[in-house]
Image: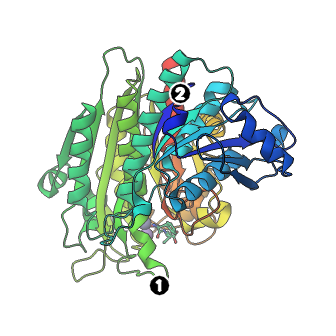
């Protein structure tokens, strides 16, 4: 949805006006004052998920959408209401809508609330329909004017509009790439998309192919790629504004399809493993948004990409692999491939000596067992960084929950034949994966985000469509913004 944040929406041009109403409140919304009276007379109370439409006003349709108690208002409530609005507008074939939010969340303030609501609105009617050959008019584009809560003046609205657009564009990149099927989104394709996005955002992009990856001795990436008919790619994106004081490296897992390899996965839900490149997509979408926002922070995006398939030449359990760092790994399970490709990417990132390294990966089923889709797992060697990321996540509605990466867990990945093994077994699976990654990090401020549970929705929910969610972009942009302020 194309969203414009404005205090002065064009009411006459709109098909449908939506006003979010908290339970038992009568906010002063001039453009819908009469309708609100009529609707209140009909017994509308503002309970969460309650909606009521009147069809006699201007514009023709005015709908009040309940969001529950004002004091209990959360980002989740807002997202639910906004998703409801998008579904109504789509079904009713509205093309031009206005959405009025008369409240701000106390913790976020009017500006923060506007950002959250506007980017939820921008994402609310998204559908990946590239391969739908018969499109109906429900998929026609919708334009929305978003009227922010009191306390946002016209100038602030314009600034928030630019910000929300940048974030929405980044999220869109992540979702399109994440939802793309594995036969389209190959490592080569991810490289091409990265080049396109980089060109449009005015940043540098270098895509390395097999020969160069061999020259760099990226043994982890090459091992996983051995079973594949597709060439691997190692992609480096560079956004380097002049005034930057800090340098952040973002590292993404780009497994375009994870069959498990020789340690093959069961067939049930295997198709979901096309989403195993969502970490890579998050890196691309975030650096795109950072460049569009012209944030004064240097950002390097690093993506390792291949698929993971079984074949006669595939890597196999028992193999010992020498990674780019020189450290050796005994393969226990070829399905623990994410950490193999990240070992090289994290080593590469460490050599750049950035101030912070953040990595994004749909890394373990164990993380999904622990947190489902409510939070991403956060692992860090730096308490200050971890705390900051958690706070940024709270502000933008992208929860992170910290889990340990203590060295004590290293026992679980000790190998008889090599420096370590690539699997520590079932117990503490998300942590042993993080502890493995840490072996390749040489940076005092590193965080690993296991987004296996948050990167894509298995089913549609009251807040979100099925498929890639854009996980990682919002929290990382908030973090980069916090660096540019300090
Ligand atoms: N891509 C998977 C992790 C995953 C699982 C993501 C479910 C999203 C949903 C990863 O490569 C994997 O297979 N991990 C294994 C590791 C194990 C073999 C040590 C896992 O979690 O089972
Ligand atoms: Mn796997
Ligand atoms: Zn995987």
Q: Quadrant of residue 276?
A: bottom left
Residue drawn at (60%, 45%), measured in percent from left and top? 398
Camera-nearest residue between 168 and 421: 168
Q: Find residue 149 and report its horizontal and vertical position in percent.
A: 67, 28
In the drawing, does residue 21 fall left or right of residue 141? right
In the drawing, does residue 156 fall left or right of residue 36? left
Residue drawn at (35%, 81%), measured in percent from left and top? 262
Res 277 label: none
In the picture, which quadrant includes the C terminus?
top right
Q: Find residue 216 and report its horizontal and vertical position in percent.
A: 20, 48
Which of discs 2 and 1 lies nearer the camera? The answer is 2
Q: CA distance from mark 2 to mark 1?
A: 50 Å
Q: Which element is circle 2 on?
A: loop
Task: Identify the residue under disc 1.
Answer: 266
- Asked if residue 52 shows in the view, the reply is yes
- Asked if residue 376 shows in the view, the reply is no
Q: Is residue 114 above or below residue 473?
A: above
Q: Find residue 171 and report its horizontal and vertical position in percent.
A: 44, 46
In the drawing, does residue 310 fall left or right of residue 84? left
Residue closest to the far front = 56
Task: Identify the residue under disc 2.
Answer: 6
Residue drawn at (22%, 44%), measured in percent from left and top? 196
Q: Earlier in the sequence, mark 2 or mark 1?
A: 2
Residue closest to the far left = 211
């Amino acid at each position: 949805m194309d969203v414009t944040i404005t205090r002065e929406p064009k009411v006459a041009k709109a098909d449908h006006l939506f006003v979010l109403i908290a339970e038992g409140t009568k906010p002063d919304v001039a453009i819908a004052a009469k309708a609100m009276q009529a609707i209140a007379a009909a017994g509308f109370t503002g309970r969460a998920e309650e909606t009521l439409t009147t069809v006699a006003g201007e514009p023709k349709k005015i709908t009040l959408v309940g969001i529950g108690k004002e004091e209990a208002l959360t980002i989740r409530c807002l997202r639910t209401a906004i998703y409801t609005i998008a579904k109504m507008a789509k079904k009713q074939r509205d093309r031009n809508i206005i959405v009025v939010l008369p409240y701000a969340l106390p913790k976020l303030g009017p500006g923060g609330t506007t950002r959250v609501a506007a980017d939820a609105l921008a994402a609310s009617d998204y559908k990946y329909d590239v391969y739908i050959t018969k499109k109906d008019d429900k998929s026609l584009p919708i334009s929305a004017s978003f009227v922010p809560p009191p306390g946002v003046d016209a100038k602030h609205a314009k600034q928030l509009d630019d910000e929300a657009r940048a974030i929405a564009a980044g999220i869109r990149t992540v979702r399109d790439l994440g939802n793309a099927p594995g036969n389209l989104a190959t490592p080569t394709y991810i490289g091409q998309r990265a080049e396109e996005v980089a060109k449009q955002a005015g940043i540098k992009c270098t895509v390395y192919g097999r020969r160069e990856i061999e020259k760099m001795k990226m043994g982890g990436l090459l091992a996983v790629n051995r079973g594949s008919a597709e060439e691997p790619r190692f992609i480096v994106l560079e956004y380097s504004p002049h005034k930057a004081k800090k340098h952040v490296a973002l590292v993404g897992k780009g497994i375009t399809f994870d069959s498990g390899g020789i340690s093959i996965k069961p067939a049930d839900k295997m198709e979901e493993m096309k989403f195993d490149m969502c970490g890579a997509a998050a890196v691309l979408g975030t650096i795109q948004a950072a460049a569009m926002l012209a944030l004064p922070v240097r950002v390097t995006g690093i993506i390792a990409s291949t698929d993971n398939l079984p074949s006669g030449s595939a890597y196999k359990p028992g193999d010992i692999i020498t990674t780019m760092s020189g450290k050796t790994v005994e393969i226990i399970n070829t399905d623990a491939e994410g950490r193999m490709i990240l070992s090289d990417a994290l080593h590469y990132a460490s050599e750049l000596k950035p101030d912070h390294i953040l990595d994004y990966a749909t890394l373990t089923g164990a993380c999904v067992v622990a947190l489902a889709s409510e939070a991403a797992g956060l692992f860090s060697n730096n308490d200050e960084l971890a705390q900051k990321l958690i706070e940024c996540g709270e502000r933008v509605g992208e929860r992170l929950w910290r889990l340990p990466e203590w060295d004590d867990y290293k026992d679980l990945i000790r190998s008889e034949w090599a420096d370590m093994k690539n699997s520590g077994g079932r117990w503490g699976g998300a942590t042993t994966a993080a502890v493995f990654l840490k072996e390749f990090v040489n940076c005092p401020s590193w965080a690993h985000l296991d987004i296996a549970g948050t990167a894509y929705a298995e089913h549609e929910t009251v807040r979100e469509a099925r498929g890639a969610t854009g996980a990682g972009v919002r929290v990382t942009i908030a973090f980069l913004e916090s660096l540019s302020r300090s």
